[in-house]
Structure formats: structure tokens, C-alpha cells
Amino acid sequence: MAALLSILAAFILYPLARVLYVAFAGEGGPTLSHLFAFFRRPLFREALYNSLLAGFLAVVFGSLIGLPLAYFTVKYDFKGKIVLQTLGVLPLVIPPFVGAVAFQLILGRSGMVNLLLLQYLGTTVPFMEGLPGVVLVQTLHYFPFIMLNAAASLTNIDPSLEEMAQNLGSYGFRLFRKVTLPLMMPGYIAGALLVFIRVIDDLGTPLMLNYTKLLAPQAYLRITTVGIDDVDGYVVCVILVILSLVSLWIARKYLSLSEYATVQRGASGSSISKKIGGLKLFIVLGISILILGISLLPHLGIALLSFSKVWSFSMLPTAYTWGNYDEILFRTPHFVKNTLLYSLLAASIDVLLGAIIAFLLIRGRVFGRNLLDAITTMPLAIPGVVLAVGYLRVFYGWNFPGIGKPLTATWFILVIAYSMRRLPYTVRACYAAMQQIHISLEEAALNLGASRRRTFLKITLPLMFGGLIAGGLISFVTSSVELSSTIMLVPKMEFGPLSYGIYIYMQSAIGRGPGAALGVVAIGLVAVGTYLIHRIFGGRTGSAFRV
Amino acid sequence: MEERGGRFLLKAAEVHLEKVSKCFGEVWAVRNVSLHIRQGEFYTFLGPSGCGKTTLLRIIAGFVEPDGGEVFLDKEAVTRVPPWKRDVGMVFQNYALWPHMAVFDNVAFGLREREVPKSEIKARVLDALKKVNLEGLEARRPSELSGGQQQRVALARTLVIEPRVLLLDEPLSNLDAKLRLQMRNELVKLQKDLGITTIYVTHDQEEALTLSNRIAVMNQGSVIQVGSPREIYGQPQDPFVAEFVGTSNFFPGEVVEAIPERLLVKTQEGTIEVAIPENFWRGRVGEPVLLSVRPEAIQLRLPQEEDHNKGNRFLGTVKTSAFQGPLVLYEVELKRGTNIKVISPNPKGGEVFRVGEEIAVLFETQEVTIIPAGSGV
Ligand SMILES: Nc1ncnc2c1ncn2[C@@H]1O[C@H](COP(=O)(O)OP(=O)(O)OP(=O)(O)O)[C@@H](O)[C@H]1O
Ligand SMILES: [Mg+2]
């Protein structure tokens, strides 16, 4: 327990505290003057405004896309529904910064669409310039969070609640507005806030699109260009943390309300999915296909780019090659290798810590349970940039005992960052798995003469095995495409993982092909991982992506 | 909307089911059911779990469209009318109270849907809550109510729209035993006062027998027997009914003599004499029948004791005896191997027959019910 708490304190609490300290420390004692200085700088004010706007717009557009899809797939019954549901989560498998590159190919200044427009209308539309580009990419990447959460909420609504309203004379849109919508609200809001947090924290997309008037890129730029002692960078970090914390808090509040709508005993069980056909089916399918078609374009774009030899100022590549894969698999194989190594290590650490923490949270009567719970939830509210800045502050230039050099000079700092950032998900997966094991199963074993240790090994562990695997997979998958803390923490080029490789390659025109090939590898990793998680979680995949 | 002004009696509808069937995949949830439920009647669907009671109720409410057959409300075919246009009030087994609305809004919902004026809504909601003894809880959320209170809100919410028929799906099953008895009484009183046609679903035979005017006993999707509680209990026409409603002892046999008001049936244990009520089933000689005798209709005597009552008398051995306070339950094996159940009131003197004791069993001729063969055991 003490060892556990000191790990969490050293790698979560302390770095965060140091960031806060720098931001609020004055000549003699705490001060708010840095904070005020932040608000006096027009650039920072603009960044804050832009970040809030980007988050807000991504939520609005994401809802416009995600809510109808959720409603269609839960409430209507039609052929091809499964396909729709599957395609709906595919945007999540493409890391947003990879998506950003792909969208530039399609919608960028010299992308497919603009080339067409130029050819036929003699003009171009700056889809991808500045904030709109960022919002576009993030909306299309994150709307599945809204869709999954809203769909989970909808599915959980006890059908008799809606039938009762029908029984009393309500139907159609009135029924939706007065009963269905209020009941699905908590889940929807939780999903929306999750998107908001992610968008504000996202560093990769704005950097890829070369738009830096947002909070996360500002923090990154201050620290990497001005220097590690620049106070403004820390203030930006504090603002980021506050925004995330507030959103997380609201989301949790709403989620705890959502429990009330879940299915109760004795329900008729058959949720009301209506068979539809004719015009309605046509409209539903039309909207769904249009939305999914657009959000799946990046996958296609990246795949094409990864095989292209020459692709500039033309609709499609003009020459194809295997060379890009050759490059990333044989000439610079370390990107992929590093990713596998780091993510695997991070996942193992998470599973180990997650199982222990979950066990303590459920079965332990230890002092400090709530504290433990709070600390393990913290990383959800700490943006990657902030954690990275904290690590740099704490470990930079300080020779770590036993290694003989600073922790930030080794690749292990990446593993630590990944494992801490994903810990909440693994804890949750383990917690859920363990919760389903009724204590009587363990007691039965104890009663039959098994020791506590053997009971844990023979009964508890095997029963929660699925949960452990799922938790590890979530950690693995998300770590393998993590960019925001990676960019800041990579000590040397050859220690860089896949996401870093993509970022570096994409900086130059000739690197785009290999970068895309790495992107395809990333998509493949995430897709396989997500599929496996889905297999283990069954229909409740949404629960793995919740706040 | 005028005629909605609180005169339930005029609105109560009769319900008519005509050869209604519903199949889920391979399972016949409801199979060829025809019923006639009279105006103002308290009518119960009784049957074991999974026999199709809920499905039948949901067909009447319009949530399930039958594969075949018609549903009539007051002669009007409503089989294809959507649930929100039927004016048939249903109380769900789990109450289905909306958690995001206060008690008042829950109850007012149906009235608002019908665009009743605001002032009238208030008066009617308060009145409905008063009817179910729930004054003063209007502002609470459903989660802040006890099970019994939730149940009453659910009832008030349905009653307030003054439906033509009231459907209750095991409304008491989520309550504890004591509350269940209390609500049962209140329900009967309320139903009498309002005079509303009520269809009640339960798998609890005692509940069905106490509450109902008439009962339809169901099994595997079919209605087996319809009748008053007395008829169902006293003259089961099917072994399933006899066994499900109370328990019974069965004697398969063959009619050997049929004279007015009396029938002699040859069974494995000997000849049993049966008194037949007038206009009841008249057996023909040689026809196979099944006889049913309720355990509480059987008396036990010492074998040497003389008995002057006319009736059926057999010898047997006590196999088991279970003391249950006011009652003693016996299992007796008759001479030819038939096992029967006997329930006797606990005698004052505490005289209980011992296991292994030789005894005589007695039952009167009018306690024997004939179940026509062909209904099958
Ligand atoms: N929506 C459905 N889909 C498939 N089968 C169903 C559905 N609803 C009911 N059934 C089946 O139909 C049969 C009758 O179900 P029903 O709910 O009417 O039983 P019940 O008599 O109300 O039982 P209980 O007393 O347990 O509530 C059961 O075998 C059930 O499994
Ligand atoms: Mg039922």
C-alpha cells in the first residue's frame, strides 16, 4: 500500500504539484500575478478563447453527427445496422494527428477537393486553414464518443418507461422530447464533456495543421522554445488542468445521475426497436452513409498515401510503391519496435497496478480508499502536455538514483508517462471485472480450506482475467498512438515511438509517404486492439471509453 | 373532453378477445385465446411463469400486435390501433415511474397529453393522489418513495386519465408480504368504488381467488378454464387447473354406472361414488374419466372407527406427516399403491397420526370432481 501510494505520488501528484508551484510562486510567497499576466497577453487570451471555441464547436458538430446515429442504431431495426454500428467506431482507430494529415490530402489547400474546385469553379475553399481545420478533424475523430455514450444511455432506458408514456397517450416526437431525451441526457452530456476535454488537451492535431493559437500548443511552444523555466508555460498548463477538472467533475455528476434509467427487474425486456422501411429507411440510411462516408475518408487517404511515390497537386497519386513500408520496416524499424516495447511495458504496469488498486478499492478496508480512488482518477484531468511538463520539471537534470542519469534522458520516462496516463482506464476495467465476482465465490473457497493467497490465485484472478486483458488492451492501444506527452518527452530521435515518427516524417514533403505507412501501422494496431476489446466487453464497448 | 368529467361507470368498457395468437420464434406466447370480459368486472389471468399472461395483457394494451385474432373494446375492433389511442390504462410490474419527474408531474403526464386545462389538471392529480392515500408527496422524486408508495403513484398515474379498462401486471409482486395484503384490500375497494373494468395478472393463486370476479387459468399460452373463484377451485375441469390452483389428488378410472345425480367410477383403489350437480357433465358407462379430490376434503380416521356418513372409504398407511401449526399435512399410501395428500386441521387434543400407522381415509361424494378425459393428465 505504501509502495503503491508512493509510486502514484511520485509520478502523478508531485509533478502536478510542481507545475502548480511554478505557476503560483512569487518572489516571497504565493502570488496570482502570473495568472493575471496571462490574461493581459492578447495571444494567450486568444488561445484560451480559441480552445474553448474549438471544444464547443467539436461538441456541437459531434452531437449533430453522433446523436442521430445513436438514435437510428438503437431505436430502429433495419438491414445493415451492424455494419453501421461497426463503421461508427472506426474514426476512433485513426489517431487524430494521422487524420489531420489525411484530411489535408483531401481537403487541404492542394487536396483533392480543392483541385476539383479549382478545375471546375476556378476557386478554392480553405477548409483546413486555422481553427476550422482543427475543429473539422477533431469533430470527425471524436464524434463516436458522443455516439457511443448516447447509444449506451438509450439502450439502458427501461422500455417500460416509454411504453407507459405511450399508454398514457404520448407518441412520436412528444414522447421523445418529454421522456426519452431527458432520460438519455446524462449519458449524452458525459460523452459531450469527454469530447470537450479531449479536444482541449489535443496537441497533435494543431501541430500537424500548423495552427498554434490554442492552449495546448502554446504550453508546448513556451516550454520547448522559450525554455523549461518559462513561467507562462506553466500558467497555460494550470488553465488546461482547471478546464479538464471542471469538465470531468460535471461529467461525473451527470453520470451518477444516469444510473436511474437502467433496466429494472420485471421489465418486458424487449427494447422498442422499430422495424422501418420505405422513405424513412431511405432517409436514415442516406444520412448515416453520408456521415460515415466522410469520416472514413481519412482512412482511405492515408492508405493511398502510404503506397504513393509521387502525390502532389494531383487528384490521386501518380506513382505507387512499396518503398514506404520498406523504409519504416527495415530502414527505421525502431519506431514500430519502440512503440510495441513501450506500450507493452506500460500496459503491463497498468494491469499490475490496476489489479491491485481495484482489489484494494473493492475488498480492502484500508484507510485512504477515497484518496486512492481520487488519485487514480486524476490522470483523466491531466492533459498529456501538462504531465510531460511536470516530468521535465521534476526529473530534468536530476540524476535518478540507480541509473546515474536523469530519468528524462532515458526512454523509460515515456513508459511511465503512458502507464500513468492510462491507469484510470485499467483500474476501471479491473474494477468492473472484480465487481462481478461475488464475494461469496471467494468465501466458498476460503470455507473449503484454501488460503487467502490461493483463493486470489485460483478463484479471483481467473475470474477477472477477461477484465485484466481488456484493461491492458485499452492501455496498450491508447499508448501506442499517444502523441502529446511523447513529443515533449522523447529524449533522442532513436528512442521515439511510432507517433513521434509520424510527426517527424510529416514535417517534410518526402517523409509523407513513410509517415503514412506508419499511420497505417498505427491504425492497424488500434483496429486490432479495439476489436479484441469489443470481443471481451461484448456490447458494452462504450463503457471502456467513458469518463 | 366533456364526458371525461369523472364518471367512471359510464366509461367502463367490455373487452373481447377473438382467437388471439402470438408467436415469438418457436414459442407460442399466446395461443388461440378467446375471452369475454364484462363491463366493470375484476378479471384475472392466472398461470405459471412464462405462460403468456403479460403478453396477452400487452396485446390488449397495444404494445404487442397479435399474429392472428382480434381485440375488441366495446365492440370496436382495436387490434391495429396504436397504444396511445386506446385509452387502456396499464400499470407495469416495475411501476415504470419516470425518474426525471416529480410525483405530481408523473401523475399529470397523461392529462397534459390530453391537453386538459391547467387548473383542472391540478385538481384531478390531487384527487387521484388522495384516492390512493398519497397526499402531500407531490413534490417528491420517485427515488425518494418506498416500494408501496411507488406502487400507489403508478396506480394514480393510470387512474387519473380515467381509462376505459385498467390493466395490472403483477402489481403487488414487488411488495413485501404485509404490504401486499394491505394493497390487495385497497385495490379491491378502489376497483369497486370506481367500477372500472379491471384485468389483473398474477401467478399467485391465493391473490387470484380473493380478488377476482372471474379467473382465466392459463398454461403454455392457452386459456384452460374460465370461471368464478369458486368454480375454479371447486370444479377444476382440467388436471392442470386442479393442480395449479391449490393441489389435488387424482384417480383415473372408468364409469361403471351412471344414474341421475350419481356416478360410480371404477379406479385402481376400488369404486368411487361421485355426486353430480344438476346440468353438469353426464358420463356414459365405459367412458374414461379423471377424479379429483382436494386434500382438505379428505378426513382421516382410525380403521376400527365406525363411520355413518355415506361416502367413500379406503384403507391406507401414513407415509409422512408434517406439523404446520394450524394444519397437519399427511401423505398416505392407499392399499393399491396410490399416494394421496391430506390436509387436516390440527385437532385440539393434539392427536396426530404417526408415520406407519394404519388409517382409514374418507371423502364425501360431493367432494369429488370429475375431469373429463381427453383433457389428459
Ligand atoms: N419479446 C419477446 N421475444 C421473445 N419471446 C418472448 C417475448 N416476450 C415474451 N416471450 C416469451 O413468451 C412466453 C410468455 O411470456 P410472458 O412474458 O407473457 O409470460 P408471463 O406469463 O407474463 O410470465 P411471468 O409470470 O414470468 O411474468 C415466454 O416463454 C417468453 O419467453
Ligand atoms: Mg409477466
Image (cartoon, coloured by chain):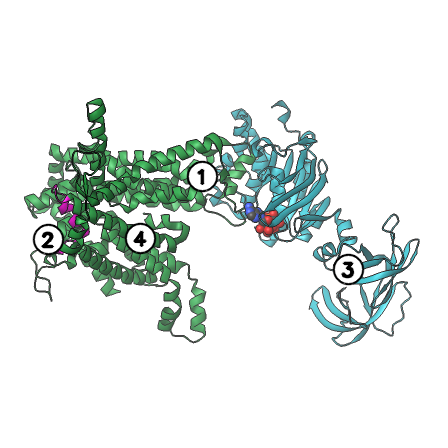
Chain colours: A green, B cyan
| The stretch drawn in magenta includes residue A502 | yes
The x, y position of residue A382, in whole percent, is 22, 48
| The stretch drawn in magenta includes residue B219 | no
Tag 2–tag 1 contact (CB < 8 Å): no
Range covered by the magenta-colored residues: A493-511
Is A37 situated left or right of B369 in this image? Answer: left
Q: Nearer the viewer, mark 1 or mark 4?
A: 4
Measured in 3D between alpha carbons, the distance from the residue under mark 2 to the one under mark 1, in whole angstroms, is: 55 Å
Q: Is mark 3 within 8 Å of ligand 1?
A: no
Measured in 3D between alpha carbons, the distance from the residue under mark 1 to the one under mark 3, in whole angstroms, is: 51 Å
Amino acid under disc 3: Arg
For label 2, the SS is helix
Q: Which mark is residue A528?
A: 4
Is A422 situated left or right of B259 in this image? Answer: left
Residue that numbered label 2 is attached to: A493
Tag 1–tag 4 contact (CB < 8 Å): no
Q: Which mark is residue B100?
A: 1
For label 1, the SS is loop
Measured in 3D between alpha carbons, the distance from the residue under mark 2 to the one under mark 4, in whole angstroms, is: 27 Å
The answer to whether residue A545 is seen in the rendering is yes
Q: Which of the 4 image quadrants contains residue A475? A: bottom left
Do callouts 1 and 3 point to residues on the same chain? yes
